[in-house]
Amino acid sequence: MTQGSRFDLLVVGGGINGAGIARDAAGRGLSVLLVEQDDLAAHTSSSSTKLIHGGLRYLEYKEFRLVRKALQERETLLRAAPHIIWPLRFVMPHMPNLRPAWLIRAGLFLYDHLARRELLPGSHGIDMRRHPAGAPLVDSIERGFVYSDGWVDDARLVVLNALDAAERGATVATRTKLVSAVRSGGEWQAELERSDGSRVSVQARSLANAAGPWVGQLLHDALGRPARHAVRLVKGSHIVTSRLFEHDHAYIFQNPDKRIIFAIPYEREFTLIGTTDVEYHGDPSHVAIDEDETRYLCESINRYFKRKIAPADVRWSYSGVRPLLEEESADNPSAVTRDYQLELDAQPGEAPLLSVFGGKITTFRKLAEEALDLLDAALGRQAHAWTAQVPLPGGDIAGARFEPFAARFAGEHPWLPAELARRYARAYGTRATRVIGGARSLAELGPTLAPGLYEQELRYLCETEWARSSDDVLWRRSKLGLHLAPDALASASAAIDAWFARAPAHIVQRATSVLPG
């Protein structure tokens, strides 16, 4: 891309909504530029509870339309990316003092039937004294319920959408910030700033503001425009502990404050616990868990598990800021809708502007589809929606059946350690063969830069997935950092950053978003 390059659509924001919009637009034949001020999924989109779900608790707030839409998307996404999205069974222990059993049964019946369900089993009651999920829990819990939802590697979901967009012709520029954009001559005249401080100007026939927590700030500061909608910033924090149970089910726990907490098997060795809902007024770039949130999550878990945890047991934590639609009637952050609103500013003769307010990771594809329908109409185009039937990169697994695929991949590469072969299959799906290239032994994968991370994979992440730092690799495109002791993590981070520093310019060009002047 050169100074003065023209695009049909400039998308601002490299989270799940921006990446989804860029993918859909590129597939409809638009020339697309996606810009992200940091790394893909660097903020909210890598800080979720990592669930593809309808949102069982939203039924209590009568969000039936949102739940139905999310349940429909759950089925679509399970087929689109079976390597990074898979079914997960949830156990809800029954606490008679919080919600009556009949109410839970009614909610689960709705959850099972609000949308067509083909891939996941339905809900049913269980005797906790006999079910394996009851063993780790306090003896007073005698009954419960089991239902289905899905798990997702959220950061990789963003990367795969951006990758598909790029392979369909989009330009993806990370570490690139929109400084300003003005309408002129039926186009947007946009000024972008690279990470090194240099700037480049581009033109676009339309602009999509998918900046997440920064959506309002972008409208005000970079575009100089008011918004009809506002976002309410709500911080959600999670903690990770050593594994608290051995089975493969997750838990959904009811709290006396009417919130729910998940405890989810995570990265084989750990349990992921979250989330909180706390009003947030700071810079979304610097969000972090506080002592009260950590204590709240520990206390919530201790109501249910025999094994008690304390803040000292937390191995890792992360926080994200959710940009939720502002509602005057919702005093409780937990009650704020997770639905989205698309705001289109399209005056005759002017370049259209579409802004995304709210949303949740499960409905990103539908959001993008609706956004492109609006933009196509504003641009005087007619194009068909297409993403519902097309897998994401690596997701073209026969019958969406991951386990047979993983077994075949391991069998075709017997020199790979079993754990490494499975990680490659999970992270990259059918594209795992591209990651290893022509290697026929571990030695041919190159030097080890961290336990389980070989140079061949690092090169792939840099050349293909826009990685350019140790954080990009160890915490977003993988979770290898979670498995390392502090000293080993520091050493691995230094080795990876040193590799990026000395990598040839043609390898890192795509990752560093060099936009020629």
Image: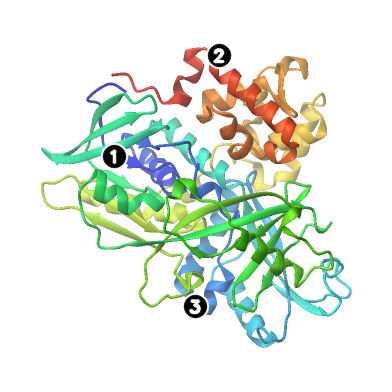
> At 70% across and 45% down in the image, what residue appears?
402
Residue 368 appears anywhere in the view: no
Residue 52 position, x and y percent, is 58, 57
| Quadrant into which the C terminus falls | top left
Q: CA distance from mark 1 to mark 3?
A: 36 Å
User: Which of the 4 quarters of the picture holds residue 117?
Assistant: bottom right
Q: Note whether 29 is above or below 79 in the view shown.
A: above
Residue 483 position, x and y percent, is 74, 39
The reply to whether discs 1 and 3 touch (Cβ–Cβ < 8 Å) is: no
Query: Disc 2 marks which residue?
Result: 502
Query: Disc 3 marks which residue?
Result: 61
Q: Amino acid at mark 1?
A: Leu
**For the residue labelled by badge 3, is the local secondary structure a helix, a strand or a loop?**
helix
Q: Note whether 27 is above or below 152 in the view shown.
A: above
| Quadrant into which the N terminus falls | top left
Query: Disc 1 marks which residue?
Result: 9
Q: Amino acid at mark 2?
A: Arg
> Tag 3 or tag 1, which sits nearer the N-term?
1
Dot 2 crowding, Cα within 10 Å, few <14, some 14–19, many 20+ = few
**For the residue labelled by badge 1, is the local secondary structure a helix, a strand or a loop?**
strand
User: Which of the 4 quarters of the picture holds residue 411?
Assistant: top right
Q: Amino acid at mark 3?
A: Tyr
Q: Nearer the viewer, mark 3 or mark 2?
A: 2
On the rendered structure, is 140 left or right of 191?
right
Q: CA distance from mark 2 to mark 1?
A: 34 Å
